[in-house]
Amino acid sequence: MHKRYIAGILLAALLVSLCGCTSVFDKEYLSVRPYEEPSNLLTDADTTQIRNYAGLMRALNTMAAQYERSFVLAFGDYDGIIADDLAAACEELRTGTAIGAYCIESVSYETEQVIAYCEASITITYNRPESEVRSIYSAQTQKSILDCVVDALDRQKTQFAIQISTSTLETDDVAALVRSACLNQPQLVVDFPSIDVTVYSGSSNSQKIFGITLQYSVSESAVNDRRTQLDGRVRTLMSALTTGEQETSLQAAGDREKLCFLHYPPLYQGYECPEILRLLQRYGVKRCFYGHLHGASHKRALEGMHYGTDFSLVAGDRLDFVPKKICE
């Protein structure tokens, strides 16, 4: 009797539960959300996850050169122990690389396993401002180093840095190159500076960053005033020396086609010599060739048609020292 009573209670409870769940089974909900890759992940080659130590170092160096303070790396099918390699790579970035020796104070990280791959959140603390790091020059040869220095002089920089890969150059060598560039750019260096060069290479010594400081004996405004005065005097002298000789030559050409060859450009960015330009127009000179602008100064050249004359810069390094055919 007791067993029948218990069985009856269980049956009643089952019937009640089935009746009460009818409304639940009548409504089914399916929620589908497409998988979204985290936007702040940095992966090797932008398409695959970091898979080895070399790829990890490339990623860290890239982010440091871009002055990234915090970012996330994704690892998949990694060849090695991620935790050990992260510790070693962060330390190598800070103490073993040129960029680390130049501007990195500390590197820290945290890891998190996300289903099929691992994420590492990296934080870099820098000891130099972003503007200095992003403006580091890159050079491979002595000529390109000279070009970098001339560009810095043209921009009136008193502090700048040049990164050189696999170089045997030392601070004295770079200081000599800077001195040579200053001597060969008198229009830019009106007060010869003292030159201080510091090398940052880290323990690996495979790359070097040379920090260069130019110390002038006068203020920046005084340097600018001297450059302006020198530029004006040079223009006056160029006009006086050139126009008389050029006019004599142009008159002797008579009605023949006239080509003009000058050492100094009669116009470039921020400058025009009106006397020479008027002379070219007066005698109908169709083409004018000039030199003088070298290395980083190429960007200041004005070429093509101006005032009815076609101008061309034919400096040797602009033409890669390959002769340019001018006429038949």
Image (spheres, helix red, strand yellow):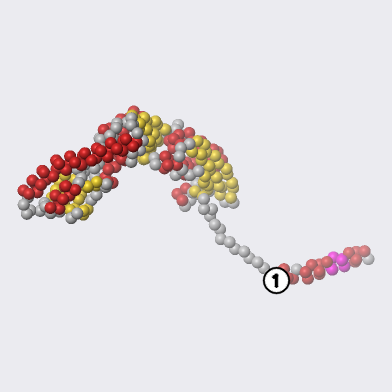
63 displayed left or right of 118: left
Q: For this rendering, which residue is in front, 52 or 278?
A: 278
**Residue 142: image x %, image y %?**
30, 36
Q: Is residue 4 above or below residue 54?
A: below
**Residue 215: image x %, image y %?**
35, 31
Looking at the rendering, the stretch of residues picked out in magenta corresponds to 7-12
Q: Residue at x 11, y 45 (%)?
A: 246
Q: For this rendering, which residue is in front, 324 or 47?
A: 324
Secondary structure type for disc 1:
helix
Q: Residue at x 35, y 38 (%)?
A: 157
Quadrant the N terminus occupies: bottom right
Residue 133 seen in render? yes
- Name the main secondary structure of what is drawn in magenta: helix
**Residue 158: image x %, image y %?**
36, 35
Q: Residue at x 45, y 39 (%)?
A: 129
Q: Toward which corner of the image does residue 153 lie, by quadrant?
A: top left
Q: Which residue is mark 1?
A: 26
Residue 326 seen in render? no
**Which amino acid, mark 1?**
Asp
268 displayed left or right of 56: left
Q: Toward which corner of the image does residue 81 lie, by quadrant?
A: top right
Q: For this rendering, which residue is in front, 188 or 315?
A: 188
